[in-house]
Amino acid sequence: MTLSQSSFKKIKKIVGTQACTRKIEDLALYAYDATAITHLPDAVVFPENASQIASILKLANQENFYVIPRGSGSGMTGGSIAIYGGVVLVMNRMNRIITIDTKNLTAIAEPGVITKKLHDEVAKYNLFYPPDPSSSAFSTLGGNLAECAGGPHAVKYGVTRDYVLGLEAVLPTGEIIQTGVQTKKGVAGYDLTRLLVGSEGTLCVITRIILRLIAQPETVRTMTAFFPDIKTAITAVTAIIQQGIMPRTLEFMDQASINCVADKFETDLPTNANALLIIEVDGSLPQTATVAKEIEILCRQHHAIETKIARTSQEAESFWKARKSISPALFQYGPHKINEDIVVPVNKLPDIVQKISELKKKTGLTMVSFGHAGDGNIHFNIMLDKRDKKKLKKAEKAVEEMFDYTLALGGTISGEHGIGITKAPFLTKEIGKVELALMKKIKNIFDPKGVLNPGKIF
Ligand SMILES: Cc1cc2nc3c(=O)[nH]c(=O)nc-3n(C[C@H](O)[C@H](O)[C@H](O)COP(=O)(O)OP(=O)(O)OC[C@H]3O[C@@H](n4cnc5c(N)ncnc54)[C@H](O)[C@@H]3O)c2cc1C
């Protein structure tokens, strides 16, 4: 299914010569994502509307080539990599926020909009779009929808899917469809919107998005709590949730991630702290003051060494700096990272933390954990040099053991990064035979020739 020269000529006619390339140096720029797995596509195309994408997909069906949608390439599971070659559709020219409807609290945007741009634009109207993957400064709405991205706010506000009302999308066969509603409610027919969100670019190319917005909370209070070890920190997390307190973020970092950030960046992290919680509450001024105090007391009851409530937005920003610096800082532990985003019910967090510590001891591998503790989502990383085959094998075994344990606790193997290619071998651990067959049938109905984003999920 390699792209022929004549098919490429036809693509040029569809999008214009300036909007497609086969130069090797250009292909290399779109050959990888955050997994560091690489595969050169046959061509890269920058469409500017749904009808160009529809024409390309119709051509792909007639002339047998693959099409792979791509946002910013920040995906953690290889979803936008052209593993079998084909045409990578880079969506970043479709980057307009079309409307922000302040009367109905909705926004309509194109998929290439950078998430933070939407956050900033709606904030000008005192509105709030809660989904906030830590990559929001560079990931796109299209990529967020395709992966059903989460983020720190998910603990209180839910994930991307909870804010998508409707879509315009191009099917793999080239038809342009409209799904969902622009209203608060709508139950006409099957919920295709919910099916397409989280479909990892395998069922459609999203070309327009109708989003639900909410009002900006009046105030946000940011605080940190440092603990002598990860177990006490996690017990504090479960205590906060069990108390019925609903912080808007409840993030944690283990000792390895604190050390790693402290080594790499200038921070004032206490040297005797082995675990950190970053907590935010929002609401009215008196409400946040009371809740922040309650959380502080709970943390201290659970052996926090130090707690701090930010007094200014700059101070709050500095609290977040440590959390947001983890990913780039981690690579000092090894050139490669195996990054899993398991989720367990919150009351099982202490078990999973115990398991990670056992696995560390058993394997001698460098493991770093951080993440969205409030919703049970742990980013469990193994740092290594993948050229060391012995270590790689050990790490792969550890990941599998971790997945088995997560599932036994009633969890899932992916909270927000998707399955892509890296988790595909493990999908059958979580999804039953009948359900998997149903999913494959759905894929087949949408994409009978298998031209869209092949080799992903299954
Ligand atoms: C430092 C860092 C922090 C991160 N933090 C988080 C986090 O907190 N939460 C989280 O959920 N993720 C996080 N991620 C992962 C990643 O940023 C998200 O998955 C993000 O949604 C991907 O967006 P993207 O634009 O980069 O998409 P890409 O990586 O380009 O693509 C991802 C998938 O979406 C598909 N796709 C892209 N655009 C479209 C479209 N228009 N139509 C159909 N399919 C499309 C692709 O085919 C691919 O399967 C993080 C990544 C990094 C590097």
Image (cartoon, grey):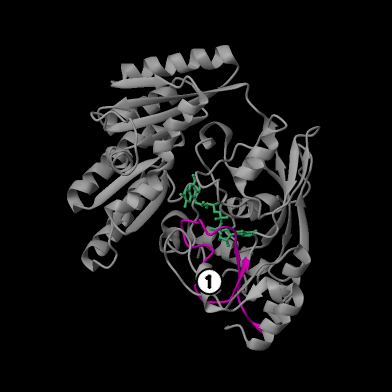
Give the residues drawn in magenta, as a range.
63-89
Residue appearing at x 40%, y 17% in the figure: 296
Nearest to the observer: residue 66 or residue 268: 268
In the image, is residue 83 part of the stretch drawn in magenta?
yes
Nearest to the observer: residue 220 or residue 443: 220
The quadrant of the picture showing ligand 1 is bottom right
Total marks shown come to: 1
Q: Amino acid at mark 1?
A: Ala
Percent coordinates x, y for residue 441 in the rendering? 61, 66
Q: Where the N terminus falls, by quadrant?
A: bottom right
Q: Is residue 404 visible?
A: no
Position of residue 165 in the picture relative to residue 443 (left or right): right
Position of residue 156 in the picture relative to residue 402 (left or right): right
In the image, is residue 421 part of the stretch drawn in magenta?
no
Chief secondary structure of the magenta span? loop
* SS of the residue under disc 1: loop
Q: Is residue 58 visible?
A: yes
Tell me the residue that label 1 is attached to.
Answer: 82
Residue appearing at x 58%, y 33% in the figure: 157
Percent coordinates x, y for residue 47 in the rendering? 70, 66
